Amino acid sequence: MSTSASFPTTRLRRLRYNPAVRELVRETRLSTKSLVLPLFARAGKNVRQPIGSMPPHCQLSVDLIGEEAKEAQKLGLGGVILFGIPAEKDPLGKDSYCESGIVQQAVKAAKDAAPDLLVITDVCFCEYTSHGHCGVVDDHTGRPDVNNDATLELLGKQALSHAQAGADMVAPSGMMDGMVGAIRNSLDGRGFEHLPIMSYAAKYSSAFYGPFREAAESTPQFGDRRAYQMDPAAGADQALREVELDLAEGADIIMVKPALAYLDIIRRVNERFPGVPIAAYNVSGEYSMVKAAAEKGWIDERAIALETLTAIQRAGAGIILTYWAKQVAAWIHP
Ligand code: PBG
């Protein structure tokens, strides 16, 4: 701890009177370079389908994904993460690993429009499967559930097809045991040894994903995701085990999700794994709550968003996925 003298020799308010001094001693500075914007790709041309609970976000047809990517590059964002909403869903989510799939098209459009923009893909099945679960469903446990090991092979195929479409990074979000290793295995030896994996390592089964499921049309058709996503009340050490396993399987960046209710987890991961880049997903519900309250005039959206993102970064996340990414660019570089 500090060895400084006590009051009145020491007066911490000396660091606060002058705005220039406050600015000088700031430790956490938001930068657009650390922010990743989620985008939702759908079929069609010139389609902008509003996501009711997340204004002004829309599902965008592939041509408009290109436009959005250009803007993200111009604003200096750290990257975009693409989610695909296929025209047709089936039990295996085949569109997710098809060369002409929706997300593969979106990746190509984004890279063509903005070659220098980092394009990440979310690797999961829930947007693509007719049942809305994050993998292959069968009743191997006696009731319908996601079959972990059967899903791994398809995750490998999906990640490889995203890489072949031109993705710069893949981000598996399904919380299958062994998913990072299976993806690494599938990429290596096929010319993608260099492609980084950002793993949703500590992803909780959270009600904060509600608005996203509207956006991605990925609500499970039966049951919930508690048999694969983490229990919010599980010991924080379980998150550290998840992170440790993912790192051992080859994860390059570790994600904690959601962000705001899990700042303790971000901090624990940061302290336990120094040098490992940490991303936090400031999820849909965290965004929608603020939007709704701001629309009622109850809170100041800009102030709350910037304070929230500052707190997430201060907790230890150097990378933040956020639906505010474009607005932050306007707020901090007016
Ligand atoms: C799964 C996925 C989800 C989110 C990102 N990837 C949803 C889920 O697990 O149900 C949620 C993101 C958000 O709420 O903003 N593919």
Image (spheres, grey):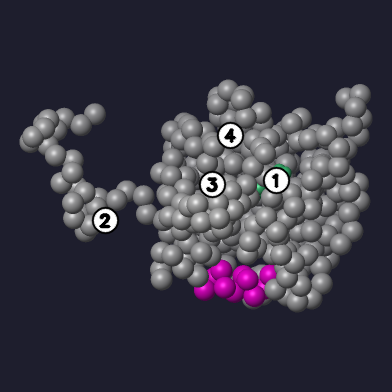
Is residue 187 part of the magenta span, yes or no?
Answer: no
Is residue 69 part of the magenta span, yes or no?
Answer: yes
Q: Position of residue 65 (x, y in %)?
A: 68, 70
Q: Amino acid at mark 3?
A: Ala
Q: Which residue in the structure is indicated by mark 1? A: 210
Q: Quadrant of the C terminus?
A: bottom left
Nearest the camera: 284 or 96?
284
Q: Is residue 304 above or below residue 107?
A: above
Neighbour class for label 4 at 10 Å: few (<14), some, many (≥20)? many
Q: Amino acid at mark 4?
A: Val
Question: How far apart are the two marked residues, 4 and 3, measured between alpha carbons?
Answer: 12 Å
Q: Is residue 49 above or below residue 153?
A: below
Q: Position of residue 113 (x, y in %)?
A: 64, 76
Q: Position of residue 156 (x, y in %)?
A: 77, 47
Q: Amino acid at mark 2?
A: Glu
Q: Which residue in the structure is indicated by mark 2? A: 23
Q: Position of residue 313 (x, y in %)?
A: 44, 47
For the magenta stretch, what is the residue range? Answer: 65-74
Q: Quadrant of the N terminus?
A: top left
Q: Nearer the viewer, mark 2 or mark 3?
A: 2
On residue 243, the disc is 4
Tell me the residue at 70%/73% (across/down).
Answer: 64
Neighbour class for label 1 at 10 Å: few (<14), some, many (≥20)? some
